[in-house]
Amino acid sequence: MKVKVNSKKGLKTNLSIFVDKKSIQRKLDEKLLELKDKVQLKGFRPGKVPTSVMKNQFGKAIYGEVIDGILKETSKQAIEENKIKVAGQPKIELKSFGEGKDLDYNMEIETLPTVKLKSLDKIKVLEYEILVEDKSVEKRLNEIAQNQKNFIEKKDHEKSEIGDLVTFNYKADIDGKQFEGNEGKNVQIVLGKDLFIKGFDEQLIGSKKDQSKLLVVKLPENYPKKEIANKKTNFNCKIINIKKPAEVKIDDELAKKLGAKNLNDLKSLIKKQISSEYKSALDNMTKKSLLDEIEKNHSLDLPPNLVEQEEKILNQNLKGDEIQKFKEQNNAAAKSRIKIGIILNEIGEKNNLKLEEEDIKKEIQKHVSSMPGQEKMVMEYYQKNPSAVASLRGALYEDKIIQLIKKKINLDKKTISIKEAEELIKNFNDKNKKIKQKNSKNKQQKSKIKKKIKKVSKK
């Protein structure tokens, strides 16, 4: 194989690659020998088919397969020998090929730009820690306790009230006619939640144990049997039991019931949970500030094909008119993502950062553990979707680079209250929303100006 660099212009490199016919023939002969033991032809014993017969029978198909393999092998070797950082799929132009001929082709490669990394030690970014006060923990603990309601039986003479748990059997009919699914045994509802059939709860208020009651309600419009949906229905109910809510004691027993060692451990877990709820959003703000600074400090040309691919990803859930509406905004976002991606990758390479397979396995296991009861399904998803694993790999590698950058920049840490965190997050979200709206308005204004210019030019 002979490789010649024809030209280097901007982010495009053009190579000439030449493979002599002897090398191609050697590959063809190897392929024919490989197939000889596998092919079965009428009149020949397995493995005894003459090479000339094999060539006449399968020559064209084998040649195509061999040339395809040579193109992949030689193009990869040429890129590696010339230390080219490829951005996207290279374009191949065949100049000369055919049985008994040399292979001569050109390859045009769009390359990644050369990145001159700027010093990171002048970058200043804030990282936030959440101060979770005891009163916030107590408030959350009380909310949890309320959702863990216990019920105790009422006395036989006591009537049901809102909040009580009523157990009953029922038999229903429409104009005296029974229907499929018209009976229920040991049905339980908490009065006031109105979760059974609208208007059912309120008619059970004031009931007593062992009492029989006739309730009249309309079946819901979305009832599975369309022919009886929205029909007035009689429910003959027999009250089996009535229980009233009992106050839940916030103690070690409750904590153990919720999976904690004791009450102090539960409070500690709640504190971490509250902190993590805000920490994720605050960390994203820090990351955004950090990446904005890195992008601002670097200037580089971007491969058009990578920008185009990123735009397609941003547009994939948009309709035709929406693609035009957000064209400018998504083009800017695509350029920003590609630019940051190239810079981060360069930082990773310069610092010899690598992602181990063990890191991927641990992350997948985290995802599996986060979905109790669906572990098998989640694991199979990653096993059957290499693209999902690749996406996970990319996110982990980026996070590793971000953690490295944080060690090299001026990272000021600030402890804030929950109220301050909520205000910061709200302002951050509002600011991003305004930027999107502003970009959209600018696009609309430009469109109006273009229309006016067209009207003037027609006159």
Image (cartoon, rainbow, N blue to C red):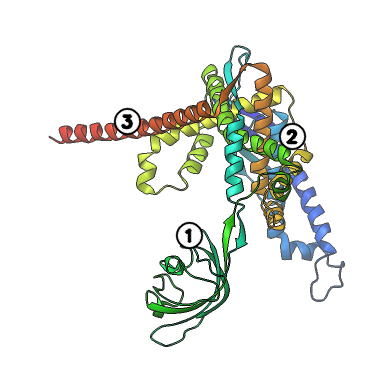
Tag 2 near tag 3, CB within 8 Å: no
Q: Is residue 58 above or below residue 103?
A: below
* Residue 128 figure quarter: top right
Residue 196, above or below 125: below
Q: Is residue 70 above or below residue 116?
A: below
Between disc 1 and disc 3, whose residue precedes? Answer: 1
In this view of the protein, which residue sits in the foreground, 223 or 271? Answer: 271
Query: In this view of the protein, can residue 398 be seen by the observer?
Result: yes
Which residue position holds label 1?
Answer: 162
| In the rendered image, the vertical position of residue 68 relative to residue 434, given as above or below | below
Q: Position of residue 424 (x, y in %)?
A: 49, 27
The residue located at (52%, 23%) in the rendering is 292
Binning the other alpha carbons within 10 Å of mark 3 as few (below 14), some (14 to 19) or many (20 upward) gives some
- Looking at the image, the residue that sits furthest to the bottom is 177
Q: Is mark 2 on a helix, strand or loop?
A: loop
Check the picture and name the quadrant holding the N terminus.
Answer: top right
For residue 355, the mark is 2
